[in-house]
Image (cartoon, rainbow, N blue to C red):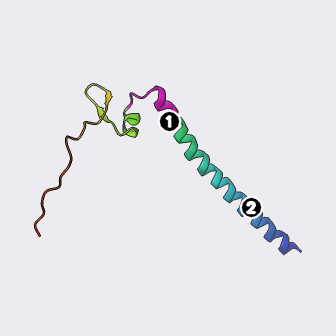
């Protein structure tokens, strides 16, 4: 009877560890994204928030600038056969 009880206890502890680890990973990832998105909502003029929006950081003026438009349609050069 002792072996059955120890096996059940071991399985319960493994399940508890798996649930705890899963919740920790899910909470950390979601919480971090929420904090970053909320912080970038009112303090967008930081290098990190600028990079997240795929803009360009101007280090001389310390401002975030939108990317420059690409002129015209792109036509690849002819490659030798």
Image position of 24 (left or right of 46): right
Image vertical order of residue 72 relative to residue 5, above or below: above
Image vertical order of residue 55 relative to residue 29, above or below: above
Q: Which mark is residue 72?
A: none
Task: Identify the residue at image location x=40%, y=39%.
Answer: 52
Q: Which residue sits furthest right?
A: 1
Image position of 79 (left or right of 58): left
Task: Identify the residue at image location x=85%, y=69%.
Answer: 5
Q: Which residue is mark 2?
A: 13
Residue 1 at x, y = what percent?
A: 89, 74
Residue 21 at x, y = what percent?
A: 64, 55
Q: Which residue is mark 1?
A: 37
Residue 73 at x, y = what percent?
A: 21, 46
Q: Residues within 10 Å of mark 1 (few under 14, many from 20)?
A: some
Image position of 73 (left or right of 64): left
Using the numbered discs, state the Cα–Cα distance from disc 2 to disc 1 in whole angstroms: 36 Å
| Quadrant of residue 48 within the rendered picture | top left
* 43 drawn magenta: yes
Q: Residues within 10 Å of mark 2 (few under 14, many from 20)?
A: few
Residue 32 at x, y = what percent?
A: 54, 41
Name the element at disc 2: helix
User: In this orientation, which residue lies closer to the viewer: 78 or 34?
Assistant: 78
Sooner in the amino-acid sequence: mark 2 or mark 1: 2
Say which of marks 2 and 1 sits in front. Answer: 1
Magenta region, residue range: 38-46
Quadrant of the snapshot with the C terminus: bottom left
């Amino acid at each position: 009877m002792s072996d059955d009880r120890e096996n059940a206890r071991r399985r319960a502890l493994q399940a508890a560890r798996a649930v705890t680890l899963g919740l920790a990973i899910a909470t950390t990832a979601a919480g971090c994204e929420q904090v970053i998105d909320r912080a970038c909502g009112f303090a967008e003029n930081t290098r990190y928030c600028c990079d997240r929006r795929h803009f360009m950081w101007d280090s001389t003026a310390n401002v975030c600038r939108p990317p420059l438009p690409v002129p015209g349609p792109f036509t690849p050069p002819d490659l030798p056969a």
